[in-house]
Amino acid sequence: MTSRRQRTNSLGLTKADYNARPTTLCQGCGHNSISSQIINVAFELGIEQHKMIKLSGIGCSSKSPAYFLGGTHGFNALHGRMPSVATGALMGNHQLQAIGVSGDGDSGSIGMGQFKHVMRRNLRLVYIVENNGVYGLTKGQFSATADMGQFLKYAGLNELPPIDLCMEAIVAGCGFVARSFSGDAKQVRELLKAALSYEGTALLDIISPCVTFNNDESSTKSYPYGRLHEVQLHDISFVPKLDEIEIDDYQPGTMKEVEMHDGSQILLRKLEEDYDPTDRMGALHRLQWAQEKQEFITGLIYYDNSRQALSKVMNMIDEPLGTLPNEKIRPSKEKLDQVMENLI
Amino acid sequence: MTSRRQRTNSLGLTKADYNARPTTLCQGCGHNSISSQIINVAFELGIEQHKMIKLSGIGCSSKSPAYFLGGTHGFNALHGRMPSVATGALMGNHQLQAIGVSGDGDSGSIGMGQFKHVMRRNLRLVYIVENNGVYGLTKGQFSATADMGQFLKYAGLNELPPIDLCMEAIVAGCGFVARSFSGDAKQVRELLKAALSYEGTALLDIISPCVTFNNDESSTKSYPYGRLHEVQLHDISFVPKLDEIEIDDYQPGTMKEVEMHDGSQILLRKLEEDYDPTDRMGALHRLQWAQEKQEFITGLIYYDNSRQALSKVMNMIDEPLGTLPNEKIRPSKEKLDQVMENLI
Amino acid sequence: MAIRSAIPDAAVDDSGQRSVINDFSIVVATANGTGSQTSNLAILRAIYKMGIPVNGKNIFPSNIQGLPTWYHIRVSKDGYVARRENSEVLVAFNSDTAVQDLQDLPSGGICIYRDDLKGLPERTDVTMYPVPLVRLLRQTGAKGSFRDRYTNMIYVGVVARLLDIDLEKLDLALDIHFKRRRKLVDMNMEVIRMAYDWAMENLEKSDPYRVAPMNETEGQILITGNEAGGLGSIFGGVTVCTWYPITPSTSLVDAINEYLPQLRIDEETGKATYAVVQAEDELAAIGMVLGAGWVGARAMTATSGPGISLMTEFIGLGYFAELPGVVWDIQRVGPSTGLPTRTGQGDVLAAYFCGHGDTKNVVLFPGDVHECFKFGTTSFNLAEHLQTPVFVLSDLDLGMNNWLSEPFDYPEEPIIRGKVLTAEEVAEKGFKRFADIDGDGIGYRTLPGNEHPLSAYFTRGTGHNEAAVYSERSEDWLENMERLNRKLDTARDLVPAPVVDEQEDADFGIIAFGSTKFAIEEARDRLAAEGVKTSFMRLLALPLSNDVREFVEKYDRVYVVELNRDGQMHMILQTEMPDLATRLVSVAHLDGMPMTAAWLMRTLQEKEGEAA
Amino acid sequence: MAIRSAIPDAAVDDSGQRSVINDFSIVVATANGTGSQTSNLAILRAIYKMGIPVNGKNIFPSNIQGLPTWYHIRVSKDGYVARRENSEVLVAFNSDTAVQDLQDLPSGGICIYRDDLKGLPERTDVTMYPVPLVRLLRQTGAKGSFRDRYTNMIYVGVVARLLDIDLEKLDLALDIHFKRRRKLVDMNMEVIRMAYDWAMENLEKSDPYRVAPMNETEGQILITGNEAGGLGSIFGGVTVCTWYPITPSTSLVDAINEYLPQLRIDEETGKATYAVVQAEDELAAIGMVLGAGWVGARAMTATSGPGISLMTEFIGLGYFAELPGVVWDIQRVGPSTGLPTRTGQGDVLAAYFCGHGDTKNVVLFPGDVHECFKFGTTSFNLAEHLQTPVFVLSDLDLGMNNWLSEPFDYPEEPIIRGKVLTAEEVAEKGFKRFADIDGDGIGYRTLPGNEHPLSAYFTRGTGHNEAAVYSERSEDWLENMERLNRKLDTARDLVPAPVVDEQEDADFGIIAFGSTKFAIEEARDRLAAEGVKTSFMRLLALPLSNDVREFVEKYDRVYVVELNRDGQMHMILQTEMPDLATRLVSVAHLDGMPMTAAWLMRTLQEKEGEAA
Ligand SMILES: Cc1ncc(C[n+]2csc(CCOP(=O)(O)OP(=O)(O)O)c2C)c(N)n1
Ligand SMILES: Cc1ncc(C[n+]2csc(CCOP(=O)(O)OP(=O)(O)O)c2C)c(N)n1
Ligand code: SF4
Ligand code: SF4
Ligand SMILES: [Mg+2]
Ligand SMILES: [Mg+2]
């Protein structure tokens, strides 16, 4: 075999270094594409895998952390409970960058409460919902994001209104809310990069078709539907803080730049004229409208970086709490004696 | 003692007939006022107590069903779990009219998931949140509806954004969403009456001050704040279907009538010019605005009766399932034999 | 006491050829999500349609597509249906596992394999039948997803030829499977026939295994425990069924969903006499059950271990507030998420003591599909009569695999609604919710909707007195909790009594429960053949009925056989009979697979050796 | 063996008057939410500042305001602190309960009551001291909410006069209570003095009860078990504490929240070396604990029964995925919501077997405030060393009541972080997460953030092999579960050993755990005085250490004493020692109140009678 030099990134690593175990998901499952994009992004950004953690709940989607970033510690938690485990992990070590992967059943049904509350807390967590409108792993029941009126061979007719996780996140206080489509690799990548730079909880609600149980074109969560109907709100690119920003074809009014905490930028080339992702009401409005019209909008739906990450709010020491030396975590004898004195 | 004739209602009952055990809540607790209004409304509407059920979770608020409608079966469930118990009860007997009482901790913290999902299901349930921004029964911790930046003696500074249960309900698909103030007896009553006529889940988010732990005027959930800052979106009155409607001072454009499924009407005398409670986006918008401005708006915030109650969607037989005769619930021998035949 | 070899002795048949007829096992190794279930079920059905007792067990992975799956078919002229440790006939169609699969094949067995498999070990002690899969597939002209399906039909054809399976019966089996859609049947039969013919021409049968028609399955049905439980619940009068999907319980509710519309639509109105609700999680599912039970519905849910854990708080409420409700736990392997597609009996303690504080719950243990059906009525009757949550502990093996069985008789057990007072009765006798009028610990209840003004009371998980009024008084607490204990004692007489089979002068006793009965019965037969006499008590319920003690008293050693690590039933038996504790010997084992008679014989032999 | 009368024999003092000094109990009956706690604590503190051993128990309702509350103060020159069945001194200030309260007063007792109480029974066998509350209140000029508070100070003054409590010490007690805010102290002392003076002039002391200074409490601290546990956790190195409020555990986290800023702000940076998070519920609280434990934090939560039930699924994950974490369960009375403000020991089974499938957890049982403090370190050490969730089962009585105690010594037990590999160690030795290298069942772990590329692994609740890779293989499951059992055996040697006090030729043994020790010690003293010898083993942990068996082997009868209905520890002991099962006699009782020595003596006497 000819030994072609493999492309390496700033750390001198090849993309293969970001692989993990081979997937056991179905061929063509949207979740696999998302895993690939995570690998791509980690490679492109030159991420050090040991500085990250990956977490998930239970479901096909939640299995996927086993299939990317093999050099990163992972935690496959309980059904619907990834948020609390991530919260604990990020309290115990707030230096880590966390990716949480969940499903629509995992987050929208059993995990609804934890989903809402992790959004309120605003930890530094990229929260990916691999949304297929169905319970994949248990073979095809409707999840809470399935459309009202949808019909599935296994589950019959869905008669309940869908939960829109982007809306839920915004209402709960999340400051980075995006929707994308696993078939739109570039957008997924750029959103992922931006989310990783965000100093708080970033929600990526990625429509990720289940080819086995919910891929009929009549379903808004299918590939055919997504390919035909995706409406990008903007063309998004992420510019890391070190890069020289060079914007070609700059036309006033067609481009929005969003400056992030760490100095990176999100560049949005507007496709939908007056969409402003920093306007909370506008964002809710747009989502509501899309829901009514069954429009599949994608892009950075809402952005706000006015809230601080929880570790800052809590004034936590810079070092990870979990590995503080014993001297720092057991007060002195004098201090105990003082306390005792006051109790006499 | 002189025996004054007591006022009686259409059933010949006095108001006292709607009492239950004496309250064990603190004197002046907002929850007690709400209980009184429930008693008033039941008396005024001539409600037959055995046709109702009352349910609750755990908390001071959730104790209150013990203090109204003593002739009604009650169920004091688990913390945050009233919605599922109510759902089961209304599946088992969809003829019953249900009042569910919960607290802001009960619904907004531990019960968030069930809260959202009962709204999606749309059973015939009047869901009252007695919202005081605090955990009363466990003595003064912040609940999820407490304002960001609020300070409490016991709990210190609240650094998380509040959950707005009206917004949550609308986003989840609820078609009757109202906010009120336990200090505004008349409004509470009219909203309650309307909610009882609604054929689906109706949310009443009633700010109900905790005089013991959260009644400082700096708190938006206090009596002083409520009294000073309440902004009614409209003056609401409920007209049962049998009443002759007589509207005095009718001025075009100042009044909105909402026709309910059962023929009753809600009359809204507009106080806020262009507020239209049947506009979902407008409602979300208004709530969002109020949240940002810390405005205390009350009234019928959102109304929609396009969805059917779950029992209809499920095409359930008219009689309560729970008490169907044995013949109706055990299929015949012939049917079993048929099934067996097909399995050979 | 020698353990027999796993391979039945070969006999010599009329034609003078050594042959093993209707007494061997087949294992089909494929990947899941390829449709191999259709093929495997076809083989199973065809054999049983030939009148031969047979049992199929699917050992499948916890994913949707592409991971190894093994389908075990046991053909047993004597009607044994337990798993066997070895299968003599291997269909090696999964390249990922073929090497190991072939290694596991016992000496003398046969291996039917796709000839594109690489690196198979050389074995001279087995018969190898290569199948030129790619070529045969090409002949079918199959493309795309059909390639997978036809691959599976190809091994059906080859197996049919080699084992003498009747092609007519295969056609019948597919006809049933595809619900009479002949086109589908014919398409698949064509492939089967092609492979059959190819095998006829190209493979020389040189092994002893084959089937031959019998008359032992006439009129029998083929059904899974979950279907039986679902049907049983329908004939038991379920009106509210709530659930949250979880393997291996999902198919129980699937069955309910499938059969309800055909069995329980009200004839007059065309409306449903039931409600099935997919809940947002197990917390909600059990909450709904108790809410529905409170208003009088026969309410149930089905779940597995993780769901039971989540329901713990609500079960405690149900116990203490005395609410009826039925929870089917189709056990898989725990702790935690564990092995979702493997079988076990590890939730005995979790169910019996479910809840903090002092709780003890009624638990039923169906041992076969008949009992699954039967307990559909029994569970509701107990729940309503005792006003308490009732668990039904089945398992993945019983629940998800197909079992041959006599058709179910119409239930003899009437539908019993328990002590519910009407308005008239309240008027007559008065009403105190928790008064123990009958001395059995069970109070009378009224349902919401009862018009009598005194019928209303407040149901709660907090302390209360006889009149259901909130109380923190020590005496009220004590009395109430003692009454609940009395109620549990009442339950001892009400729950189904153990099934006992005693042999005179038995060497020892065996106590077990649930689906291990098949392995135990087989082991007992084989032991008996070797002169070892045993008595067997199969528990059908907790709390224990009083005859358990009598049984244990009779034997010096009573082996408590169960599929878990800690010997959970053994613990419960010990605590209820401390004076007999040392007679009770735990035989507990859990590796995710159904128990085999061979393992049990070996283990009993060892333990008997120790005791001797 | 006769039970002594509940009232201590009165002695005759120097002055020739019959007197009971420093050996009686007071009960103050008020309504909650009125501030009576301040008054009661003042009495308690003043007595202890007089050098007299004393203990206070608050029997309060589960609401915020207006329901009956009883505060029991036991004055005991001998240092007994268990609850007594009767109190000789009644302060009847709650009109709702006064009739019953007076009825409960033992003959010879005294009743200090507000003279506006109606319908009190006539009793000639007790001494009645009426207090003209309204008049005295008027004298204070108090209005509004001050009326309640001053009402309570009025009884303090009267009690002080009648029992000879030192006014100086009362001043000191209030000074401590109000944290040196003298104005508050003086305002209240003024009312106390007024009432004292009124009593001096108007009430003629005609009963024997009084206190007299001793020197037995010098240097002692007054602290609740929850404060001690909170402090202990801080000195044990807690870094992440998550919680959801629930009575009676809330005050443990309150203590942590109160002390952390003063003890654990990093001196260099002024930043926090800890994180305390109020979770949205118990499911989230325990999830956070396990997530934090996974990254190396010493993480804990505190809850009570309902919280434990909700945590069940996560505890199973913690057990199986081998994650450290500490759960304090301050037990209240269950099942279900039960009696939230009453005490019990009903969560033993729920904690030990928490989780479906086969789980067994490490559980600690502190018996006094010292052990609460100590176990703050022990619990984390065990959790990290054993890589598993550890329960600490305290109870409401121990946790929420104030106890006199020697000040806590600085912990001797070092902080132990368990088997955690650094990047260098991974490079050197390699890494296989679940390999049992040391034969103790405990693998080595790496923490997220470890730079070595081989250090990463995937933590999960599903089946896995030694290398932490997903596996459905039977052998992997078996091996892993057997290793977990070995780990539990390792725990037997690591957990704190039982505390044993044996008497030679003891008539029988007693096994107990937790806060019942006070009643047991008192009962043993009294039994000894009557010639009955007993040996006492107080368990500090589950799993049982091996010395338990040795203890049981020595006695024909071993009473297992516990505050629950079902004798939960008794069950566990029986199953672990079936051969000794018949020696173990359950003495279980739960009515919500702390155990009394008198009850225990009575019960033991009965059981001994039966045995004889
Ligand atoms: C407590 C609990 N309940 C139920 C299950 C069974 N279960 C596993 S995955 C799943 C649904 C997964 O759906 P989703 O989150 O949408 O993921 P997908 O498979 O579609 O990617 C369920 C119900 C479980 N593992 N745990
Ligand atoms: C599972 C569980 N966790 C915690 C508690 C303790 N608890 C009782 S009430 C309550 C909070 C009540 O707050 P809210 O719902 O706002 O009612 P409020 O008392 O303010 O009316 C809590 C945490 C409980 N009863 N059950
Ligand atoms: S079942 Fe659906 S979600 Fe699961 S792996 Fe297959 S395609 Fe993906
Ligand atoms: S504590 Fe607050 S919420 Fe509870 S009863 Fe008192 S005033 Fe009401
Ligand atoms: Mg999904
Ligand atoms: Mg509240």
Image (tube, coloured by chain):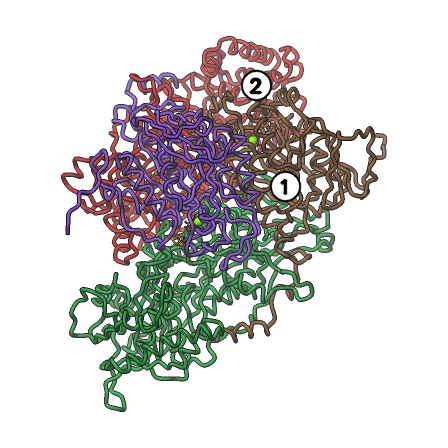
Chain colours: A purple, B brown, C green, D red
Q: CA distance from mark 2 to mark 1?
A: 32 Å
Q: Residues within 10 Å of mark 2 (few under 14, many from 20)?
A: few
Q: Is residue B151 above or below residue C512?
A: above
Q: Looking at the rendering, which quadrant does residue D191 occupy? A: top right
Subunit ID for the residue under disc 1: B
Q: Is residue B312 above or below residue D24?
A: below
Question: Amino acid type of disc 1?
Answer: Gly
Subunit ID for the residue under disc 2: B
Q: Secondary structure at mark 1?
A: loop
The one nearer the camera, D236 or C119, is C119
Residue B2 is marked as none
Q: Is residue C333 above or below residue C218?
A: above
Q: Secondary structure at mark 2?
A: loop
Q: Quadrant of the N terminus of chain C?
A: bottom left
Q: Which residue is mark 2?
A: B218
Residue B175 is marked as 1
Horizontal placement of B191 versus A137: left or right? right
